[in-house]
Image (cartoon, rainbow, N blue to C red):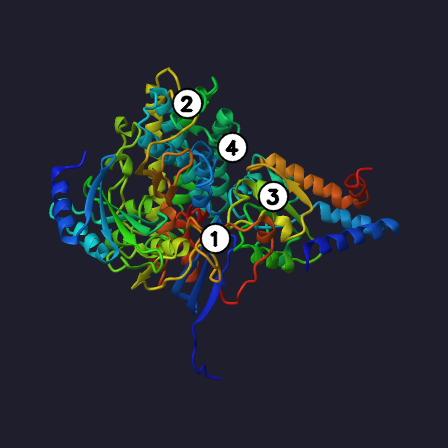
Amino acid sequence: MVSDVLRARVGELAARVYGEVEECLGVLELTVNYPDAIAALTGAKNFAEVPCDFLHDLCGMDLGDHLEVVYQLSSLRGPQRLRIVARVERDNPMIDSATHIWKGADFLEREAFDMFGIKFSGHPNLKRIYMWDDFEGYPMRKDYVIESHEQRAVMRVRKEGE
Amino acid sequence: MDVKKEKELRDAEAMEQKNILITSVDKFLNWGRVHSFWPVSFGLACCAIEMASTGDPRYDISRFGYEYFQASPRNADLMIVAGTLTRKMAPIARRIYDQMAEPKWVIAMGNCACAGGPFADSYAVVPGADSIVPVDVYVPGCPPRPESLLFGMLQLKQKVQNPAKARLIKHGK
Amino acid sequence: MTIEKTQEYSINIGPQHTSTHGVFRMVVNLDGEVVTKVEPKIGYLHRGLEKVAESRTYTQFIPYTDRLDYLAGPHNSLGYVQAVEKLMGIEVPERAEYLRVIFAELGRVASHLFMIASGSLDICGWTPWSYCTRDRERILDLFEMTAGNRMTMNYFRIGGVSHDVPDEFMPALRSFIEDMPEMSEEYYGIFFGNEIVQSRMKSVGILPQELAENLLITGASLRASGVQYDVRKAEPYGIYDRFDFNVPVLYGCDTYDRHFIRLLELQESRKILQQALRDIPEGPVMAKVAKVIKPPVGKVYHRVENPKGEMGWYIVSNGTTKPDRVRIRPGAFVNVQMLPAIAIGWKIQDLITIFASMDLVLGEVDK
């Protein structure tokens, strides 16, 4: 159910940002590398007749040899939907932050940092959000080892002023 | 202080009281205590909603004298750990418990507070509140019905009124 | 003695607090009584649901979804099972679809009743609390009649619902729906029409429309700021396109409007429940699904209109019985960002009412 206008616009955008387009259960998916992620988001926000101007979700994914940041775009003024997948390196995951486009991406990026370790450059306050500040490790990565019952039953030491 | 050691010391105190007969002053104080457990409002997750429903007009916790949920732990004598205790929250739970004045009791409400519940193998959950605070009564359920919580509080009432009886039941005699 | 100077101080409205609706913590900078900065600190109920999902099968994860927004009961499972059904291409029988709509709307009514009740409890109004929770008990009776549990029902399955409702369900539901207009009148009289509530909540905590869209706010708070958007109308899921209901929208953008729009949504939910009760057919309640759920390799993103906001489910399947990734986008988590933006300049007692109007539930915020 993808409209032809949207398909055409996404095709033009893909050519500009060197991305690949796929279709998955009725939703177009644009895969780019991490340096072009912000250009893809700004381009999608400014589509001519079908602007995808509402960032619905931002999450991380662990695919074994690399990480990914998945953006789900929709719009408050039309039925258009788009998914943008940005490939990020595993060893030093860095990507530009989307907070200057949407202020609401703040907490979502902090969660991706906390769970996967992806650093967002330009974020106003990149700290852990779900786990405590001294926690070590990135829990949602596939190679994270969960501690045993006995280790988790020991109370953690709380830093003053946390 | 290590929680196991704390429980042992408390049991020793109760044992001592059994040796020296409970005087009538103690009996009178106990009567006052069990008819007015004032819980500190420590609702964490879904069980907190069932704890709040116990205060509703239908299940009416105030007919027992227990409806006065205190905001500050310094005025309370019962802590109902209602919900999942996460590792981030554990030092705060301990601090709230330490701020309560003696005598004080703890009820672990819900599967998550008893033994971790459905989240026992999660990286962020303490499997059971009894490794952080010494628990007196366990109320299982997910979430336990308000009647179960009332039954748990009445069991605590029995335990506080007759520490000797609780000792015998615990050791299976 | 003259005062040399004053200074700002910061206090901690800690995770254990009667008015924080759960374990929410904020560090507030105050100049006298006026708030100058609010920093929310969350994560005290983080249970790691997304990691737990990777070691459970698709059907074993359904009880966990109930613990997300524990006030709305069965509504959370709706998004999850519909996402998996989209991935597998299963078609759900008619009676199951109608039953799902009935339970989802009952969950919405229960959640909104609790929000009004706790919103009034924060300003020390005990009467609306008693009235709203008494009416919410009737909905919990309906849930208990069907599935045995009052709040976390675990009733929906992939392909339908688990079993049919008992005989006494429909008459009880009919009598509840007939009592709803009288209930709304009562709530208007004791809460919304009360002049103390109006003077404390009107024009407090304005959230302008552009700021709401930039902060990615969704749900009733967005509709109270003038944007008429509801996922049930914009992208209908299930059989919501067959029902005739309006999407209320208010333009005041203040705390009072964010509370009042929940009362209007209650009345719209009543219309949906009436129509569902009138049109529900007989038939099976579960589609013919394999015993072992193994979706094909693929990705799906499904949105539903939760009572607290829009909930998004992103499920990635790798062809085995356990999912590769289940991502939950909670509406309340993104709505927390509203608080630092609109609480500046108000007094500390207004901070509590602004916080109550955001309608958070920490199970959804912290997953």
The residue at which mark 2 appears reads as C174
The residue at which mark 1 appears reads as C20
Marks 3 and 4, how far apart at CA: 22 Å
In the displayed structure, A160 sits above or below B4; it is below
| Chain letter for mark 1 | C
Q: Left or right: where does residue B79 sit relative to residue A6?
A: right
> Contact, CB < 8 Å: mark 4 with mark 1?
no
| Chain letter for mark 2 | C
User: Residue placed at 54% from the left, 55% from the top?
Assistant: B89
| Chain letter for mark 3 | B
Q: Earlier in the sequence, mark 1 or mark 2?
A: 1
Nearer to me, C18 or A32: A32
Q: Amino acid at mark 1?
A: Thr
Question: Mark 2 and mark 4, same subunit?
Answer: yes
The residue at which mark 4 appears reads as C150
> Contact, CB < 8 Å: mark 2 with mark 4?
no
Q: Residue furthest top?
A: C282
Marks 1 and 2, how far apart at CA: 35 Å
What is the crowding at mark 1: few (fewer than 14 residues within 10 Å), some, or many (at least 20)? many
Marks 2 and 4, how far apart at CA: 19 Å
Location of residue A15 in the rendering, given as x and y in whole percent from the top left corner: 13, 50
**Residue C296 seen from this side:** yes
Of labels 3 and 4, the one closer to you: 3
Q: Earlier in the sequence, mark 2 or mark 4?
A: 4
> Contact, CB < 8 Å: mark 1 with mark 2?
no
Q: Residue furthest bottom?
A: C1
Location of residue A122 in the rendering, given as x and y in whole percent from the top left corner: 29, 64
The residue at which mark 3 appears reads as B115
Q: Earlier in the sequence, mark 4 or mark 1?
A: 1
Marks 4 and 1, how far apart at CA: 24 Å
